[in-house]
Image (tube, helix red, strand yellow):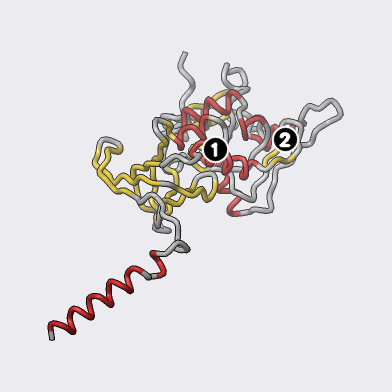
Amino acid sequence: MASLIIIALIGALAFWDEAPWQGENGPSTVEPVVITDGRSGGTLAPRLTGLVRVVDGDTISLGEHRIRLHGIDAPESDQACLDPQGAPWPCGDAATERLAALIGDDPVHCSERDIDRYQRIIGECFTDSTNLNATLVAEGLAFAYRRFSLDYAGLEDEAREAGRGIWAGTVQAPWDHRRNPQHMLIPDVGATGSTSAAQDAGSGLQPPGDCAIKGNINRHGERIYHTPDSSSYSRTRIDESRGQRWFCTEEEARAAGWRAPRG
């Protein structure tokens, strides 16, 4: 009996030495996903670290985990934006390529914020000290996803003001593109190169009708209306998908819960 056991052990060791996943043609090794405890928003949250694959401008794969970047929404991979001259450019691809360039070959670590309905991790992700979520918004390659978080609203406001990336021309919000991917807002560019009032209305800069008061919602969630003589009127955009709206009178704006700007 002992001799049979010894023979079986020798056979098992021989099989292990020749096992196909141990040979030279086996899969290359990758850095494992390390899960530790990290702090996110003042609370303890799972933190994942490892090498990633970029899926698109706001999604990465880390091992078996699909991670959606918290608080941002980048143009979709099949989405085009318009430059200041009205020419289309692949802003969705640009966001994806920029995210890949920010990561390079470095490991990424992500703090889990939530799990969405598709079972993706919602995470804030970093390489060394670079916040990937914040950088994409700051460079004008992603929206602050204000429906879910205002964490990057200020960075979006700054990028809009500076005309960076997608804000240099015309962009359709990714959530609108997902509902209607055929839609593209094409400005009517005249012979002088200036855009028409129709484009300005579509961009949220000029009223679509006679009601010209802008009901804005700032990064702190404050509802503030701007009349045409307000100092911030010309640079204030109205995005109805974020709950912003147009008013015909100041009385109407105040009744709806908006206030006049201070100072």
Q: Which residue is mark 2?
A: 199
Look at 57% across and 29% down and name the residue there: 214
- Which quadrant would residue 108 be assigned to in this image? top left
| C-alpha distance separating marks 1 and 2 | 33 Å
55 relative position to 16: left or right: right
Q: Specify few, some or many for label 2: CA neighbours under 10 Å numbering under 14, 14-19, or 20 or more.
A: some
Vertical placement of residue 138 versus 76, above or below: above
Residue that protrudes farthest toward the top in the picture: 263
Vertical placement of residue 226 versus 34, above or below: above
- In the structure shown, which secondary structural element does the residue marked by tag 2 occupy? helix
Q: Specify few, some or many for label 1: CA neighbours under 10 Å numbering under 14, 14-19, or 20 or more.
A: few
Look at 42% across and 46% down and name the residue there: 51
- Could you tell which of marks 1 and 2 lies nearer the N-terminus? 1
The mark total stands at 2
Front residue of 45 and 246: 45
Look at 13% across and 82% down and name the residue there: 2
Where's residue 86, x and y in %? 75, 36
117 relative position to 175: left or right: left
Look at 53% across and 25% down and name the residue there: 158
Residue that protrudes farthest toward the left in the picture: 2
Where's residue 4, x and y in %? 18, 84
Front residue of 225 and 91: 91
Where's residue 105, x and y in %? 48, 41
